[in-house]
Image: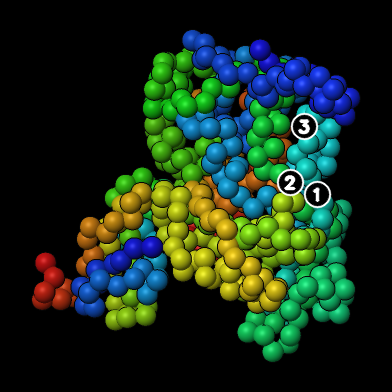
């Protein structure tokens, strides 16, 4: 049975008075049928959002979401929950801007509190040269109508008083780009909320079911072979993050991506100490405080190919050193937990979305460690592409063809070295 | 974290090395005969195996030699490491 009650204060009070009523399961556990109009592989936030928007925007409800582990157990549950749209290149920025607008109304839309907190995102520059590049990016954002402000050191002292602005620091802070609409979203709730909303519209969700191959005919995918049964599919969406190369290979597609581990950590919980997301760019460390009070830290990739979803002490030390350089009070905190995820980073560091060389197979891959923030826009545009048969204009630039044609979208200007993105 | 058996320096911590990317594809000859598709394959398509991966590592904080290493991308176990140029006598 699907969950068709509407979460509200009234329902909460009703169950406080009569605890026996209980709460229905958040989403229904389904047994896979023999065929579906659309099979979405990957029960992360992207896949679940795709299924939800297929049902909600296009009335395509004969949809199956297949997950080999548990919902939101991959990069959806392993990221540092940051949302922002402060990108320089048009294609990147437009998609994240759409996502930011959808985030703002998402809790109401799916009747599930995803705890959107637009607490502000502060991106630190460490030299005059870097500041110049940030001003260029800020101007590009303004031209597109996005919110952004550039802060000098005095203004930054007022915005983030905890920051160490000592001019003699190893990597002194020259100023910052600030997007006040940026912030954080409860990542697990995004997977659960989309799963519940999709399930209520009739989407089947199956966990603990791994895809092992595809049945093809004349260059088109016809069936999805799983470790339980063969499932007929009118259309297949591959949305599997770190596993993208492996799953695409089953359909004969070689993706221009490499899988690389990225780690994140939380400290012991403490009282409210930091009410903004801050990113340190000399090396990489992005820091925020969770609602539970933990200081949440993420860093750069491990720097080499890996499917292990774990990393080295070197990278932990690297990230923590930068967090302490920003916020000296953090030196006294004890780290509580550490984890890793497998990021599928493409040859220009940007996502690969849209039709693939295989007919009826749509790709959503290559998001690396920057996909969470784009979740609602990815779901919306991929669903639109599948339903209409026309690539949504916002994702057209992210076609897999761009690597052969040379129309790359390299925001960082790094080149075809995923381990450096 | 793992150890890389440098043929010159012995087993050393990975943190002494700098990653140099995938070593599977050979660069096309610069004789003008390589097509755009050849270059696309060399520059962009890496295989990205879940298993044994051939890759370059530079022993930055050691002998400063470039090594060609075979490493499992799931267990991180290194099975082969040789110098990209001259082989030291003790290595096979």
Q: Residues within 10 Å of mark 3 (few under 14, many from 20)?
A: some
Tags 3 and 1 in contact by the CB under 8 Å rule? no
Residue A4 image point, x, y percent:
76, 17
A281, B32: nearer the viewer: A281
| Residue B67 located left or right of residue A401 | left
Q: Nearer the viewer, residue B72 or A27?
A: A27
| Secondary structure category for the residue under label 1 | loop
Q: Which quarter of the figure has residue A188?
A: top right
The quarter of the rendered structure image containing the C terminus of chain A is bottom right
Q: In the picture shown, does residue B14 fall above or below A71?
A: below
Q: Residue at x 58, y 52 (%)?
A: A369
For the residues marked 3 and 1, what is the alpha-carbon distance in whole angstroms?
Answer: 14 Å
How many C-alpha atoms fall within 10 Å of the one at disc 1: few (<14), some, or many (≥20)? Answer: some
**Label 2: chain?**
A
Q: Which residue is mark 1?
A: A117
Q: What residue is shown with label 3?
A: A112
The residue located at (41%, 30%) in the rendering is: A251
Residue at image position (74%, 85%) is A166
Which mark sits nearer the N-terminus, 3 or 1? 3
Label 3 chain ID: A
Could you say which is closer to the camera, residue A274 or residue B85? A274
Image quadrant in which the N terminus of chain A is located: top right
* Residue A10 point in image, percent of width and height: 89, 25
Asked if the residues shown at circle 2 and circle 3 are in contact, with their CB atoms under 8 angstroms apart, the answer is: no
């Amino acid at each position: 049975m699907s969950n068709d009650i509407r979460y509200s204060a009234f329902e909460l009070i009703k169950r406080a008075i009569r605890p026996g009523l209980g709460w229905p399961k958040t989403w229904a556990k389904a047994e896979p049928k023999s065929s579906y109009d659309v099979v979405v592989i990957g029960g992360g936030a992207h896949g679940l959002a795709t299924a939800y928007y297929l049902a909600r925007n296009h009335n395509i409800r004969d949809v199956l979401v297949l997950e080999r582990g548990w919902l939101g157990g991959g990069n959806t549950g392993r990221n540092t929950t940051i949302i922002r749209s402060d990108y320089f290149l048009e294609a990147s920025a437009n998609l994240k801007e759409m996502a930011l607008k959808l985030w703002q109304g998402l809790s109401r839309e799916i009747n599930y509190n995803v705890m959107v907190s637009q607490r502000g995102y502060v991106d630190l520059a460490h030299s005059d040269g870097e500041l110049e590049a940030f001003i260029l990016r800020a101007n590009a954002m303004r031209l597109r109508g996005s919110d952004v402000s550039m802060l000098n050191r005095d203004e930054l002292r007022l915005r983030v008083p905890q920051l160490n602005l000592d001019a003699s620091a190893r990597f002194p802070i020259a100023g910052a780009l600030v997007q006040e609409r940026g912030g954080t979203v409860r990542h697990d709730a995004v997977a659960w909320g989309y799963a519940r909303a999709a399930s209520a519209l009739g989407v089947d969700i199956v966990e603990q079911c791994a895809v092992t191959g595809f049945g093809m005919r004349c260059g088109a995918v016809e069936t999805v072979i799983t470790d339980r049964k063969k499932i007929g599919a009118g259309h297949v969406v591959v949305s599997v993050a770190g596993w993208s190369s492996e799953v695409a290979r089953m359909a004969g597609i070689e993706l221009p991506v490499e899988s690389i581990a990225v780690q994140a950590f939380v400290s012991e919980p403490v009282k409210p100490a930091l009410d903004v997301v801050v990113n340190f760019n000399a090396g990489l460390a992005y820091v925020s405080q969770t609602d539970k009070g933990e200081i949440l830290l993420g860093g750069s990739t491990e720097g080499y190919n890996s499917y292990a979803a774990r990393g080295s002490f070197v990278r932990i030390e690297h990230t923590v050193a930068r967090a302490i350089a920003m916020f000296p009070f953090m030196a006294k905190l004890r780290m509580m937990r550490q984890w890793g995820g497998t990021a599928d980073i493409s040859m220009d560091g940007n996502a690969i979305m849209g039709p693939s060389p295989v007919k009826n197979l749509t790709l959503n891959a290559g998001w690396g460690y920057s996909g969470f923030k784009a979740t609602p826009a990815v779901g919306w545009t991929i669903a639109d592409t599948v339903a209409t048969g026309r690539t949504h204009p916002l994702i057209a630039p992210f076609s897999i063809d761009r690597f052969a044609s040379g129309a790359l979208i390299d925001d960082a200007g790094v080149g075809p070295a995923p381990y450096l993105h | 974290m793992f150890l890389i058996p440098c043929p010159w320096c012995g087993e050393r911590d990975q943190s002494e090395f700098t990653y140099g990317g995938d070593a599977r594809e050979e660069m096309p000859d610069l004789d003008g005969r390589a097509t755009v598709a050849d270059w696309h394959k060399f520059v962009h398509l890496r295989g990205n195996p879940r298993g044994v991966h051939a890759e370059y590592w530079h022993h930055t904080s050691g002998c400063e030699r470039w090594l060609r290493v075979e490493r499992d991308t799931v267990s991180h176990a290194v099975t082969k490491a040789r110098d990209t140029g001259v082989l030291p006598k003790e290595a096979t």
